[in-house]
Image (cartoon, helix red, strand yellow):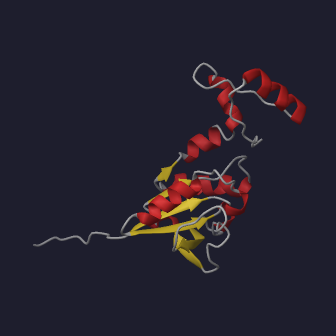
Amino acid sequence: MIFFSVLKMTKIFGFVTTPKLLDEQDTFFLFLNEALSRAGWEVYVFDAEDLSEEGESVKAKKVEHPITYKTRLELGVKEIVIPLRNFDVIFLKKDPPIDADFHRLLSALMKLEVPTVNAPSGLLEMGTKAYLKHFSRYTAQTFYVREVGEALTAIRDMKDCVLKQSDS
């Protein structure tokens, strides 16, 4: 008896994000363009609301060329239905908070055991960057403000700092 297997030559890589909400410095562009540069990789982008009713496939857009901040909305209009299990890996690059659609997608990925970058269970447990306040011993000084005046005062006091928009 002879056994043989067919090697899958194409890797299918998915990104979960909302392109219109990305900012110019988002690492999405770096990761997506790196994936595109790899021979034998197909790259798709979809959002949480693209999950099918049965929770086993998504409507995704195939990315054919490098994407920049300025071209992020030019992913194409043709949507392809792809079973979640067909992805070799899905990069969860969607910003919190976790809404009902994203929660449903994360649950489907866990149920189907689809390989991901950024663990769905971790995102469900620690769905916002505010969770970092519990690790102040290991992270840079973090503060939260609601008003521009408060932010300016903090910037003057700290000198070197990084500003990020809150996600919750």
Q: Nearer the viewer, residue 69 or 4?
A: 69
Please identify the quadrant where the N terminus is shown. Answer: bottom left
Q: Quadrant of residue 122?
A: top right
> For the point 46% across and 65% down, which residue is it?
36
Q: Quadrant of residue 77?
A: bottom right
User: Going by the image, does 47 lie left or right of 37?
Assistant: right
Residue 129: image location, x then y, percent = 68, 37
Q: Nearer the viewer, residue 133 or 2?
A: 133
Q: Nearer the viewer, residue 117 or 153?
A: 153
Q: Residue furthest left?
A: 1
Residue 22: image location, x then y, percent = 68, 56
> For the point 65% across and 66% down, which residue is it?
72
Q: Is residue 144 above or below residue 90?
A: above
> For the point 64% across and 43% down, which residue is it?
124
Residue 147 visible at all: no
> For the point 83% across and 30% down, which residue is it?
152
Tally the numbered discs: 0
Q: Residue furthest bottom?
A: 78
User: Going by the image, does 110 lie left or right of 11?
Assistant: right
Please identify the quadrant where the C terminus is shown. Answer: top right
User: Going by the image, does 55 lie left or right of 8?
Assistant: right
Residue 9: image location, x then y, percent = 32, 70
Q: Is residue 75 above or below residue 78?
A: above
Q: Is residue 31 above or below residue 137?
A: below
Q: Residue furthest top?
A: 137
Residue 157 visible at all: yes
Q: Quadrant of residue 8?
A: bottom left
